[in-house]
Image (cartoon, grey):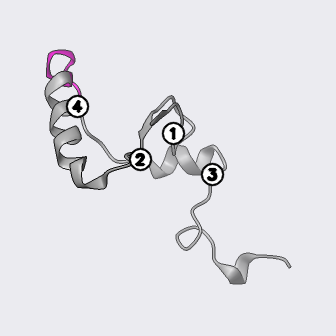
Amino acid sequence: MVSRTGWTAELGYEVYLRDSGRALELWDAMVSAGEEFDLRVTAPSDQRRLEAGIFNYGNDMDVNDMDV
């Protein structure tokens, strides 16, 4: 499944597999297909994520920050 979502509030896509045993096969196919477009593999930008108000539990906050 491909979802047009993103961890940083930027346009992004997430790919979910039913068979995780084929993850490396999918990874290699995606990287290969992206070569002609100069595809770059990166990690999410924490700065953009925080600016968008998307907090990561355990990283940006924990149970002590919750007002319950």
Q: Could you tell me which secondary element the residue under label 2 belongs to?
A: loop
Q: Label 4 sits on what residue type? A: Met
Describe residue 2's horizontal placement relative to residue 39 as left or right.
Answer: right
Look at the numbered discs 4 and 3 and tell me whether their residues touch, using CB distance below 8 Å: no
Which range is magenta? 34-39
Look at the numbered discs 1 and 3 and tell me whether their residues touch, using CB distance below 8 Å: no
How far apart marks 4 and 1 lie (CA) works out to 17 Å
Q: Could you tell me which secondary element the residue under label 3 belongs to?
A: loop
Q: Which residue does the image show at 62% across and 58% down from the upper left?
A: 55
How far apart marks 2 and 3 lie (CA) works out to 12 Å
Q: Label 3 sits on what residue type? A: Ile
Residue 50 position, x and y percent, is 58, 51
Q: Which residue does the image show at 57% across and 62% down from the upper left?
A: 56
Residue that numbered label 2 is attached to: 44
Residue 27 image-quadrant placement: top left
Residue 39 image-quadrant placement: top left
- Per the rendering, the mark at residue 30 is 4
